[in-house]
Every structure is written in C-alpha cells, then in structure tokens.
Image (cartoon, rainbow, N blue to C red):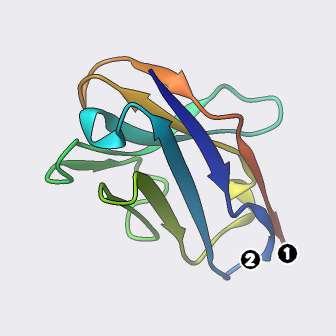
Amino acid sequence: QVQLVESGGGLVQAGGSLRLSCAASGRTSSTYAMGWFRQAPGKEREVVAKISRSGGIIYYAGSVEGRFTISRDNAKNTVYLQMNAVKREDTAVYYCAAGGTFGGSYDYWGQGTLVTVSS
C-alpha cells in the first residue's frame, strides 16, 4: 500500500500560479501510475492529469491542457502539479491518487488540498 499527502493548496488570484505536491510513503510511488483529480462544489470528481510510472506517458484534461503540468520525482516519491494561468473554474479540492496502471483504476487517495481562485 501507499499513503499520499497533498500540500500546496491555498488562495490564488486568477491568472496566477500554484504548485501542488503529493508525497508518497509506504510502497514507493514509482510502483504506481499517479494522477491529480479535483472536485468542485456541487460537481463530480474529475481527472485533471495523469502520469505513468516512468513519466513517459501523460494525460491532461482538455480544460487544463497548456496551463497545468504534471511531473514526478521518483527519487523523492513525490508528484507535482504546476498550475499556471489559473481560472476561477479551477477552484476545487485537488486529490492525488495512485493506481496500478496508467489507464486503470486509482485505488489510493490522499485527503485533498483546497485551491481557491479569486477574481
């Protein structure tokens, strides 16, 4: 099993930047594909970005492509989400998750970190 802890959330102005981090402990994160998901108030949880175990395959949701960048440092067991040019609609609780395969289910979840974008 792996335990995930997100950090880096907070209040940011529209157009600004924020970097989220997800620290993994327990089983090393390089064993897992990793993803960032988000859930806005009153909405269902959605995928934001995913990255394969090696980092060679990356997926972005259309709403964030070109603005957000997912990366991982397996030596540090950490996954990042660099958020640039944020918009009010990016306001959500952001969750880090780990899964056995890039395209499969993500079975391990962090507690989430809140990102609030102000106008």
* Element on which disc 2 rests: loop
Question: Which image quarter is the C terminus in?
Answer: bottom right
Residue 69 versus residue 99 in the image, above or below: below
Taking depth in this image into account, of 30 and 16 the one nearest to the observer is: 30
Q: Amino acid at mark 1?
A: Ser
Do the numbered discs 1 and 2 sit on residues whose CB atoms are within 8 Å?
yes
For the N terminus, the quadrant is top left
Kindly identify the residue that appears in the image at 57 percent across and 28 percent down. Answer: 109
Identify the amino acid type marked 2: Ala
Instruction: Name the residue at the bottom extreme.
Output: 16
Which residue carries the number 1 mark?
Answer: 119
Whole-percent x, y for residue 110 in the image? 62, 34
Q: Residues within 10 Å of mark 2 (few under 14, many from 20)?
A: some
Residue at the spot 73% in from the left edge and 29% down from the top edge: 43
Q: Residue 14: which disc?
A: 2
* Residue 76, above or below 114: below
Residue at image x 82%, y 29%? Answer: 42
Q: Is residue 1 left or right of residue 74?
A: right
